Amino acid sequence: MSIEFSESAGINFSLSADQKKVQLAARDFAENVLAPVVREADREPDPLKAFQMTKPAYVEAYKRGIAFGMLPKEYGGGGLTNIELILAAEEICAVDPGFACTVLVNGLALMPVWYWGTEQQKKRVMQAATSDPSGEWIAGYAASEPPGTPGGTANFDTPLPHPVGIGVTARFDGDSYVLNGRKYWPCNVAGWDGRGANINLVVVRTDPTKGGTEGLSAILVERGTPGVTYNLIDTFGHRLTPNSEIIFENARVPASNLVEGTLGNGDLLINRNFAWSGPVAGIAAVGVARAAYESALDWAKTYTAGSPHPMIYFQNVGYVLGDVAARIEACRYFCWKAAHYIDQHDYHGELIGALNKTYCTETLLDSVYKCLQVVGVNSADRKHMFEKFLREAAILPIYDGGNFGMQRRRVHGVLASPDFNPRALMDDEYVEFTKEMETIDTVQRPEGPAGRPQERLTHA
């Protein structure tokens, strides 16, 4: 087989005029609207008050098309591609990844309605989100639950029935579902006043007799639903996005609020959502590391540590910062690749989204720490931003499903499939994600009579 050589355009890493416009608009918002409120809000000890201090910035983000830029134009959204979303997200995350997470969660809550909802649901919910004259409309996404025995969200896709895995149940009763149980960690769900977002997408167990790959669904819970209460969680990072506990006590929700296509497929909703948010989390790590690197470089170019010249001229400082710079560039382009892949494959990218999220957040957490080492003990002085960079970077590997969970179901499960092509991502081929891939290592294999492991339990 011979190779036919022809003039090649190469792989273009230059931004188009439209992409550059999105990037610069996000940078202008981040630096001139968001940045002035971040430091004071981050230091506010009350988590709800801290979040409320970002409200004017959020309203401005809404007016500029940032808050719901990821939704399709036909329902009033900005119609951004995932590449454009990533470009905007880096600029905002370099200033505050918590605020960016608030915007991200709007997408996690409403994009499943776009994927799986009825046309009536799409028009009712998404158009309400994008046409609010106050600019305060906000949505929450509730999948996570408290750690428990035997419950807890980490094994949401276990083939075992309730109470293992997702514990919030939705019992069908006439023309309603009755919800009971607790969620823990969801963002945005408590809204601006602690009494509920405009709407929350809640992953529930609609069939307690079936496991997580068959019995989960998603339902829309509107603000003001009786039997729903919220408690804010005090976190060490991402303080400008609100994490909450939700308690459902016989909360009655119209049956028409069930997102039709998610019935029995709530597990795939969770995995598809976290595939989409994978490169957003990855680029959040890029943004935080970029801010830490630029601050450390500026410090090294001005601080002498008592020597005759600035620290940047010392070999080790230059080598460490050079290593950090290379990591930031590599991770940025990996995020671009992942976002492009998701754009090309109908918002699916379960494997590449997980690979991207885990690699970038792990790699750049260490890079942020290296920046603190360059600055030295002065980085511990809270008059500088370094302690915030470290707090924000430390959140990224453990949220959004957590890197252990990402590796197990959306990496390990895919790689173990007999049909997996290890060159698929290189060749830009679609990698299908199935329920069979989810349950790898979910249930411990009991030992047989001779001490040999029996076959892993699977769902029918």
Image (cartoon, rainbow, N blue to C red):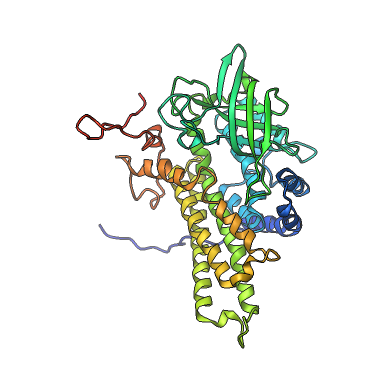
Q: Position of residue 19 (x, y in %)?
A: 61, 55
Please name the residue shown 70% across and 22% down the image.
226
**On-image quarter of the N terminus:** bottom left
Please tell me how many numbered marks the rendered image carries: 0
What is the quadrant of the C terminus in the image?
A: top left
Tell me where residue 324 appears, x and y as whole percent. 52, 67
Position above or below: 342 against 191: below
Q: Residue furthest right?
A: 134
Residue drawn where x is 42% and y is 64% of the image: 7
User: In the drawing, does residue 67 fall left or right of residue 423?
Assistant: right
State the image quarter where residue 307 is shown. Answer: bottom right
- As drawn, is 18 to the left or to the right of 430? right
Q: Is residue 95 left or right of residue 371?
A: right
- 393 lies above or below 231: below
Q: Is residue 263 above or below residue 142?
A: above
From this viewpoint, is residue 451 visible? Answer: yes
Q: How far across and down, in percent of the image, does residue 311 sit?
A: 58, 80
Q: Nearer the viewer, residue 455 or 35?
A: 455
Q: Is residue 399 left or right of residue 2?
A: right
User: Closest to the observer: 68 or 105?
Assistant: 105
